[in-house]
Image (cartoon, helix red, strand yellow):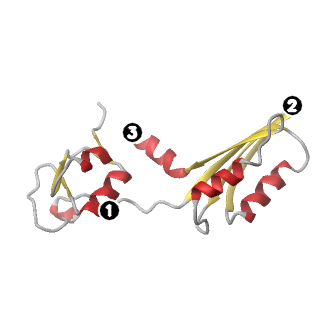
Amino acid sequence: MARPIVTRADVAAAQGSLEVPADAVVTEAARELAERRGIALRRAGTEASPSAPSPAEGGLPPAPEAPNRCLVTAVGRNRPGILAEISARIAELGGSVHDISQQIVGDYFSTLLMVDLADIESFGDFKRQLEALGHEGDYKLLVQHERIFRAMHRL
């Protein structure tokens, strides 16, 4: 049976506090909105208290601190220097490659890079500038924040 999910929309409709089913998954966006609006998220069956409850009082544990990373995927025709081109641009933009996987099949390559974004001010700018490297007929780049994958696996 699927676990219930508490989303940002659930928190937006709440006032003061929101009772969360004991087995529910609370999205990161819902936690952030609840904190900004001062809404206490309470596990079902616990008593309300005037301040934000601790996990021992039946409140939700804090969201685990996720690393600020992204996955960069590149697929296209193989040629000398592609990996160097991609990794050099990541470094120029302030990213740091932490892990890499590459596969070459015939005349084509695919690579997946795990990039640390600790020194990146704007993920949107980083994504836009890095994806601009890919050209029609050469290779295509896709940049996705790791939070997307974490959220997919929680559902």
User: At which x and y percent is residue 77?
Assistant: 84, 36
Quarter of the image with the N terminus is top left
Dot 2: few (<14), some (14–19), or many (≥20) neighbours within 10 Å? few
Q: Can you say whether 142 is above or below 57 in the image? A: above
If you read the primary sequence from the N terminus, does the residue marked by circle 1 or circle 3 appear first? 1
Query: With 66 as the anchor, is 44 left or right in this view?
Result: left
C-beta proximity under 8 Å, tags 2 and 3: no
User: At which x and y percent is residue 147?
Assistant: 49, 51
User: At which x and y percent is residue 140?
Assistant: 74, 40
If you read the primary sequence from the N terminus, does the residue marked by circle 2 or circle 3 appear first? 2
In front: 12, or 100? 12
Q: Secondary structure at mark 1?
A: loop
Residue occupying the point 59% across, 53% down: 70
Residue at numbered disc 2: 106
Residue occupying the point 10% across, 50% down: 45
Identify residue type, mark 3.
Leu
Dot 3: few (<14), some (14–19), or many (≥20) neighbours within 10 Å? few
Q: Secondary structure at mark 2?
A: loop
Residue occupying the point 58% across, 57% down: 123
- Structural distance between the alpha carbons of marks 1 and 2: 48 Å
Residue at numbered disc 3: 155
Residue occupying the point 25% across, 45% down: 10
Identify residue type, mark 2.
Gly
C-beta proximity under 8 Å, tags 1 and 3: no
Q: Secondary structure at mark 3?
A: loop
Residue at numbered disc 1: 62
